[in-house]
Amino acid sequence: MKTELEKSQEREEQLLAIVQQLQTDLDELKKAPAKSKRKFWGKD
């Protein structure tokens, strides 16, 4: 049972790391100038 708990904690930590990375990426996108955002989405 102890090993199961450790495994679930590891999974939770991995998920948290992924979520933090996504939030960082989103912040970077928000900081990008509007012109480059348009190019990114192909609306130029």
Image (cartoon, grey):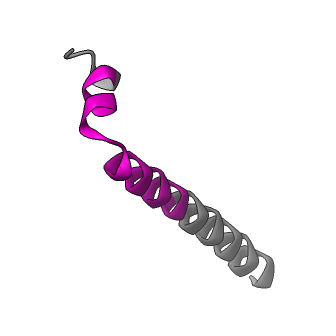
In the picture, measured across the screen, residue 35 lies left or right of residue 3, that is left
Q: Is residue 4 above or below residue 36?
A: below
Q: Looking at the image, how many numbered discs can be counted on the residues? A: 0
In the picture, measured across the screen, residue 42 lies left or right of residue 5, that is left
Q: Which residues are magenta?
A: 19-39
In the orientation shown, which residue stands out farthest toward the left?
Answer: 43
Q: Is residue 36 above or below residue 2?
A: above
Q: Is residue 9 above or below residue 25?
A: below
What percent of the width, then of the height, locates residue 20? 52, 64
In the orientation shown, which residue stands out farthest toward the right?
Answer: 3
Residue toward you, 11 or 28: 28
Q: Quadrant of residue 12?
A: bottom right
What percent of the width, then of the height, locates residue 14? 64, 63
Task: Residue at 55%, 68% (x, y): give it.
Answer: 16
In the picture, measured across the screen, residue 43 lies left or right of residue 10, that is left
What percent of the width, then of the height, locates residue 11? 64, 65
Q: Verify whether residue 26 appears in magenta.
A: yes
Residue toward you, 38 or 2: 38
The secondary structure that dominates the magenta segment is helix
Residue toward you, 9 or 13: 13
Q: Quadrant of residue 21?
A: bottom right
Q: Verify whether residue 21 appears in magenta.
A: yes
In the orientation shown, which residue stands out farthest toward the bottom?
Answer: 2
Q: Quadrant of the C terminus?
A: top left
Task: Residue at 39%, 57% (x, y): give it.
Answer: 27
Residue toward you, 5 or 13: 13
Q: Quadrant of the N terminus?
A: bottom right
